[in-house]
Amino acid sequence: MLALQGDVAEHEAALRRVGAEPLRVRLAADLDGLDGLILPGGESTTIGLLARLHGLLEPLRAYVAQGRPVWGTCAGLIFLARDAGHDQALIGAMDIHVDRNAFGPQVFSSERDLDVEGLEGGPLRAVFIRAPAIRTVGPHVKVLATLPDGKIVAARQDAMLVTSFHPEIGGDDRMHAAWVASCGRSRVRAVA
Amino acid sequence: MVHEQGTATVKTGMARMLKGGVIMDVTTADQAKIAEQAGAVAVMALERVPADIRAEGGVARMSPVEKIEEIQAAVTIPVMAKARIGHFVEAQMLEALGVDYIDESEVLTPADEEHHIDKRGFTVPFVCGCRNLGEALRRIAEGAAMIRTKGEAGTGDIVEAVRHARSVLGEIRRLTVLGDEELVATAKVHGAPVELVRAVAREGALPVVNFAAGGIATPADAALMMQLGVDGVFVGSGIFKSATPEAAARAIVLATARYDDPASVVEASRGMGEPMRGQSASAMPESERLAGRGW
């Protein structure tokens, strides 16, 4: 777990429930030996600033460039994107163009049932909180979930997974279980 | 397909995304931009910062509509705003304006000395202040989706925030060792619903995020509150009443993020400039204290 700011503990609890061992990434050295990395929800401008000031931005870019598994939720999606339409520090590795706050202010935040491609067992209860959406994707990005109005809210590119919603607080751990399985197992850190 | 807005998960979840962060009081769009650039996770719009409310007196109300709209237009981070205790029409207006969180705040002049706003019916979430666990649970029962200590706003003196955080967190720890009959009796003492008392005893934590507020003026103050066990901090007068607001804001953000590493707090404090001068909360007459507002 990238642990600079945000809902790190919620991801950690979900990871433990599916049998993974969460570790916290706050320094570059913490990235060594991980099976996968989660970029949690939070405030993307704050996470980007802290990553830059703590010298984590380049190590995170190097981690992602090696093709190692990474999953960004909400702010983590923005942090991974090539373009967030705003001047802020980004990892910038995923070929997506993001609209921040695509749903408007908090009163339009919502939870809804969502079909996610490849996720077995029916729709997921997806919690959107001042969520971003993906406006356009590059040729190597696979769209995994779309809302009825066309907003793209989950996608994958190689070992990068992004969701604009929060499976860590929706009470349904299937995405965490599937992601941990796809990492080939257990040492998973949260950059918070 | 189910699609619901304003659910408890959505309201409390919004506060979960703010954890480990600093929420800064701002009165203008320019201050909001400074806060955002310094790494604030959200800004709190209000008419005057608490130190000025103390100095100038008069009735402190919700921020003017135009000011809130200016601040919303200036930043991409969440915008919170304060409403007076019990003033549900100010809250309705803030919801209509599309603010992201409402602080039903003792810093403003109360509109109702007996009743807090019934927050359950709103789609926008609320944060409320507390001095102890009973007060926190009463606010949660009314629908608050986030809690903060009251501290003593506008003083730059951390002593009351420490007292309130220790009280809330200590009372939570005590609940975890009580038996079932004792929990019912304790609920009576706290003046809190027994179901909430049972839930806190079971989880060893509040069901909502818990921040510190009221008197945080330095990076060390922020790190102190984080080490005591809160999830994040509100800074009011401490930023824009300091000699160099940009530096103070950045310093407090860094110290909050790395609160458990003294070397990082030292590094964060370097170049922060002179903090607000402040006034001792202990020397203050009861009539000037804000924390006694609300119940």
Image (cartoon, coloured by chain):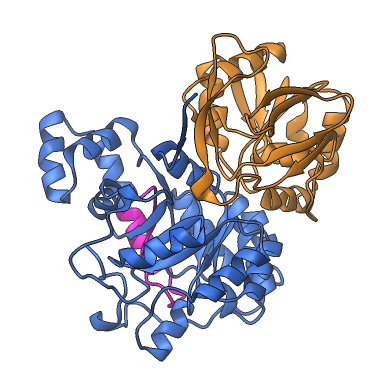
Chain colours: A orange, B blue
Q: Position of residue B190 (x, y in %)?
A: 17, 50
Quadrant of res B40: bottom right
What segment is highlighted magenta in the picture? B143-167
Give the side of residue A65 with respect to residue B140, left or right. right
Q: Position of residue A16 (x, y in %)?
A: 53, 20
Quadrant of res A19: top right
Taking depth in this image into account, of B263 and B40 the one nearest to the observer is B40
Please give the name of the residue rendered at 66% of the width and 11% of the height, measured from the top-left corner.
Answer: A181
Quadrant housing the C terminus of chain A: top right
Q: Position of residue A55 (x, y in %)?
A: 80, 48
Please give the name of the residue rendered at 54% of the width and 20% of the height, measured from the top-left corner.
Answer: A124
Give the side of residue B74 with respect to residue B217, left or right. right
Say if residue A172 shows up in the picture.
yes
Quadrant housing the N terminus of chain A: top right
Q: In the current view of this chain or complex, which residue is farthest to the bottom?
A: B56
Give the side of residue B4 with respect to residue A161, left or right. left
Residue B69, compared with residue A133, is above or below; it is below
Q: How many marks?
A: 0
Q: Position of residue B79 (x, y in %)?
A: 55, 60
Residue B161 among those drawn in magenta = yes
Please give the name of the residue rendered at 29% of the width and 43% of the height, measured from the top-left corner.
Answer: B172
Please give the name of the residue rendered at 15% of the width and 43% of the height, measured from the top-left corner.
Answer: B187
Say if residue A186 shows up in the picture.
no
Taking depth in this image into account, of A100 and B267 the one nearest to the observer is A100
Residue B192, compared with residue B55, is above or below; it is above
Residue A169, compared with residue B119, is above or below; it is above
Taking depth in this image into account, of B268 and A118 the one nearest to the observer is A118
Taking depth in this image into account, of A87 and B211 the one nearest to the observer is A87
